[in-house]
Image (tube, rainbow, N blue to C red):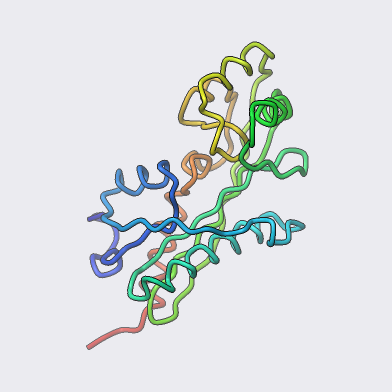
Amino acid sequence: MNPFVPEHLQQHLLLASASPRRREILENLGFEFEIIPTGVDEDEVPWHDPVGAAKLLAEIKAVEAQRTRPRKTIIGADTIVLCEGVRMGKPVDDEDARGMLERLSGRPHEVVTGLALVAPPNVRIIDAERTTVVFREISAGEIGKYIATGEPFDKAGAYAIQGYASAFVDRIEGCYFNVVGLPVALLMRMFKRLGSALPTTG
């Protein structure tokens, strides 16, 4: 149990994500939870508003999990990487990863994570966190070596800030855990809002 969240709010907790990074963050916070990955077609979401898209995707994931686990309190999350207005998803191959890393080299980019907290009977708390990350210049040789590690794959933007790519980061402005995939401070604030939103008993 997490000592900073009332026990009744963290009972029956479920993470609607297959991300090992999100699972690790929640475990390090002391939460006990079930995991149900969800399949969401991100191409069906309009991308003119990246923050709105991240929030909508997080909500869709949480609501989808709620269909099979209606009594659970569900955490849904979706992370988007944006560089010069271009959305960068998970690379499909080496060349795709190379192109993303070349674009990020020497430039700032933004990481947006939408977060949804859904609880019975019908409570939905949706929010998002934004963090700016600035990469130093990365040489072609460094990019090749990084791709060879296999780390860029299954990561939005083709990098993991907590892994080898930490060597590329010049600075960040905002929440580090947001870049990993689960903004901790925002999640804790949302648990407080959940406590206020749930009906009182007794």
Residue name at image x 36 percent, y 71 percent: 69
Q: Quadrant of the C terminus?
A: bottom left
Residue 80 rendering spot, x and y as whole percentages: 62, 47
* Outermost residue to the bottom: 202
* Left or right side of 140 for 120: left
Residue name at image x 29 percent, y 61 percent: 5
* Left or right side of 59 for 16: left
Residue name at image x 44 percent, y 63 percent: 190
Q: Is residue 120 above or below residue 16?
A: below
- Nearer-the-camera pick, 48 or 3: 48
Residue 175 rendering spot, x and y as whole percentages: 51, 43
Residue 84 rendering spot, x and y as whole percentages: 77, 39
Residue 7 rendering spot, x and y as whole percentages: 23, 65
* Outermost residue to the front: 93
* Left or right side of 74 for 178: right
* Outermost residue to the top: 141
Q: Is residue 160 above or below residue 106?
A: below
Q: Is residue 113 above or below residue 59?
A: above
Q: Quadrant of the N terminus?
A: bottom left
| Quarter where residue 20 is shown | top left
Count of picture labels: 0
- Nearer-the-camera pick, 36 or 1: 36
